[in-house]
Structures are given as structure tokens and as C-alpha cells.
Amino acid sequence: MSTERELILLCRTKIEQILNWGDSSLWTNSDFELLSDKIFEKTTVRLSISTLKRIWGKVKYDNSPTAATLNALANFLDYA
């Protein structure tokens, strides 16, 4: 069975493939702003830039993302 960390990594990878913006380690603040907007347009859930940066490991954060955050990312990927 996959761990939560592995599933989040898979989700990130799928989003990166959809966006086709190149290596996410090179993404800037404006890329995360645009991603936040795209997620909102598709899901009507606004994820903050800080939250997205935590998901992508740009900001150190030891806690797990909330269920609402994970659901928004899953919905963005067309999962129920």
C-alpha cells in the first residue's frame, strides 16, 4: 500500500505533467500563483500559494496537508 507521502508525490507528478511547465524545482512564485488560479477555476477551491509551496516542498512543513487540500488537488486531476 502506498504511503500518504508517495500519493502526494504521485499527485504532484500528474499535475506537473498536465501543466507541462518544466522542472517544478525551477517554478517561481508566479507559477504557484497561476497554479492556484487554475485549481480555483476548475474546482472553485482556492489553495494558497503557501499551501502549494508546502506540497511541492519549497517550504519546510512537517504536517500533512488537510483533507480539503488533498481533495482539491484530486478534483483538479478529475478524481472524485
Image: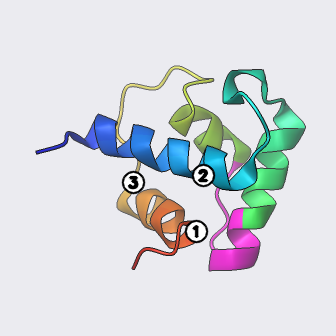
Q: CA distance from mark 2 to mark 3?
A: 18 Å
Q: Quick one: SS at disc 2?
A: helix
Asked whether the residues under the numbered discs 3 and 1 touch, taking CB atoms below 8 Å apart as contact, a structural biologist would say no
Task: Please name the residue shown 51% across and 75% down the image.
Answer: 78
Identify residue type, mark 2.
Ile
Amino acid at pointer 3: Thr
Q: Is 49 inside the magenta-drawn segment?
A: no
Q: Secondary structure at mark 3?
A: loop
Up/down of 13 relative to 77, above or below: above
**Quadrant of the snapshot with the N terminus:** top left
Contact? badges 2 and 1 (CB < 8 Å): yes
Instruction: Classify mark 3: residues with Cα within 10 Å, few (<14), some (14-19) or many (20+).
Output: few
Can you tell which mark lies on residue 66?
3
Magenta stretch bounds: 39-48
Lower position in the chain sequence, tag 2 or tag 3:
2
Local packing at callout 1 (Cα closer than 10 Å; few below 14, some 14-19, many 20+) is many
Q: Residues within 10 Å of mark 2 (few under 14, many from 20)?
A: some
Secondary structure under tag 1 reads helix
Q: Position of residue 79 (x, y in %)?
A: 43, 74
Which residue corresponds to the image point at 76% horizontal and 75% vertical from the top-left?
Answer: 41
Query: Picture coordinates of residue 17 (x, y %)?
Result: 63, 48
Question: Which of the two discs, 3 and 1, labels the residue nearer the N terminus?
Answer: 3
Residue 23 x/y as whole percent: 71, 27
Residue at point 62% right, 72% down? 45
Question: What amino acid type is highlighted by mark number 1?
Answer: Phe
Q: Is residue 24 above or below residue 4?
A: above
Q: Which residue is mark 2?
A: 15
Q: Which residue is mark 1?
A: 76
Give the mark toward the camera: 3 or 1: 1
